[in-house]
Image (cartoon, helix red, strand yellow):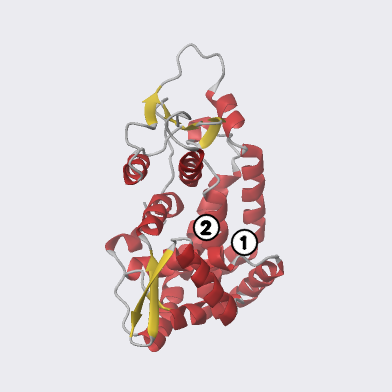
């Protein structure tokens, strides 16, 4: 299958889903394409970037307004133009997700669980719910109503999040081995995470992107920039959606045929094949409509190569 045809097939599938989640798609565009280059974009540029993905101008404007109201984006005016970028919270959540999306994943396990205990008596329900929501964003699973666990999570983002909420010391963050427990680590994971559902999502991802994966492995003289941008954005959009529900279980605790391993390799192959053409198209569009764009940050070239 030709690359353009594979991208159009993916785009048709994406557009057929209802409702089209434009807010989430815009966050993908910010995180994948804009954040490495300073993270700021004119509203008009966002409209043009979303256009080939089938998102109308009106829907972009509405979605940006809602993202700003929900504290994901912050706007600033320059003359008659409005520019938007991720808020501090948005930056933090993207940074937490970036390593998981573009890095190498957690392959080893030290045998220790990362446990977060949220006491009911000293923290109100609204704060507890907000903490649990952000911990789940970081890949934690639910052991009980106010106890969340993870086998490998970096606890630094957890501590930063708690400090930002003035909850350091009130929420207990623990790291240690299970002692005298007859339940296997695999059984505990299955109890705290819906691994069967996640495996099914990875199977669907591998199937959905098989045509694009086949097309990028064939030699070609040039790649259409707009098609590359659409394909790469949909790729990361779908992969991010699954990955942020995946606890990123280390290899020793996974079955040998875990479909997430295949999905990561497939995602890396497609991403690296489309990256340069997609970048050239997106940067040219942003510079034409909104002005100069910064060079990408140093870590950008290491995506999927760590």
Query: Would you say the residues marked 2 and 1 are in contact, meaning their CB atoms lie under 8 Å apart?
Result: yes
- Residue 37 visible? The answer is yes
Q: Nearer the viewer, residue 94 or 90?
A: 90
Relative to 99, is 1 on the left or the right? right
Dividing the picture into quadrants, the one containing residue 98 is bottom left
Relative to 43, is 38 on the left or the right? left
- Residue 217 visible? The answer is no
Q: Is residue 147 above or below residue 280?
A: above
| Dot 1 alpha-carbon crowd within 10 angstroms: few under 14, some 14 to 19, many 20 or more | many
Q: Which mark is residue 267?
A: 2
Q: Which mark is residue 209?
A: 1
Residue 182 at x, y percent in the picture: 55, 13
Residue 82 at x, y percent in the picture: 40, 80
Q: Nearer the viewer, residue 118 or 158?
A: 118
Residue 127 at x, y percent in the picture: 46, 42
Which of marks 1 and 2 precedes in the sequence?
1
Which residue lies at the image location 56% right of the left edge and 31% below the top edge? 145
Dividing the picture into quadrants, the one containing residue 216 is bottom right
Which residue lies at the image location 55% right of the left edge and 74% below the top edge? 62
**How many marks overall?**
2
SS label for mark 2: helix
The quarter of the image holding the N terminus is bottom right
Q: Nearer the viewer, residue 298 or 143?
A: 143
Whole-Å distance between the Cαs marked 2 and 1?
Answer: 9 Å
| Dot 2 alpha-carbon crowd within 10 angstroms: few under 14, some 14 to 19, many 20 or more | many
Q: Is residue 239 above or below residue 225?
A: above
Q: Is residue 258 above or below residue 113?
A: below
Q: Is residue 264 above or below residue 298?
A: above
Which residue lies at the image location 51% right of the left edge and 51% below the top edge? 264
Residue 243 at x, y percent in the picture: 53, 49
SS label for mark 1: loop
């Amino acid at each position: 299958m030709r690359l353009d045809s594979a991208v159009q097939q993916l785009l048709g599938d994406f557009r057929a889903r209802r409702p089209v989640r434009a807010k989430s798609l815009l966050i993908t565009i910010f995180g994948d394409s804009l954040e490495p280059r300073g993270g700021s974009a004119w509203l008009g540029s966002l409209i043009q970037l979303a256009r080939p993905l089938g998102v109308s101008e009106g829907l972009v404007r509405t979605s940006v307004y809602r993202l700003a109201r929900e504290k994901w984006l912050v706007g600033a005016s320059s003359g008659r133009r409005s520019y938007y970028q991720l808020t501090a919270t948005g930056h933090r959540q993207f940074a937490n997700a970036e390593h998981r999306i573009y890095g190498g994943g957690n392959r080893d396990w030290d045998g220790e669980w990362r446990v977060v205990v949220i006491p009911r008596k000293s923290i109100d329900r609204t704060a507890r719910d907000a903490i649990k929501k952000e911990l789940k964003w970081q890949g934690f699973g639910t052991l009980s109503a106010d106890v969340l666990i993870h086998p490998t999570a970096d606890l630094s983002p957890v501590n930063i999040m708690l400090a930002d909420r003035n909850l350091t010391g009130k929420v207990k963050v623990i790291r240690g081995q299970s002692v005298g427990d007859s339940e296997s680590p695999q059984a505990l994971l299955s109890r705290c995470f819906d691994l069967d559902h996640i495996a099914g999502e990875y199977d669907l991802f591998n199937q959905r992107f098989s045509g694009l994966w086949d097309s990028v492995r064939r030699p070609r003289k040039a790649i259409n920039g707009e098609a590359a941008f659409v394909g790469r954005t949909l790729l990361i959009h779908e992969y991010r959606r699954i990955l942020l529900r995946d606890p990123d279980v280390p290899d020793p605790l996974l079955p040998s045929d875990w479909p997430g391993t295949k999905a990561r390799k497939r995602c890396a192959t497609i991403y690296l094949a489309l990256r340069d053409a997609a970048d050239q198209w997106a940067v040219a569009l942003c510079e034409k409509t909104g002005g100069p764009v910064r060079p990408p940050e140093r870590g950008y070239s290491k995506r999927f190569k760590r």
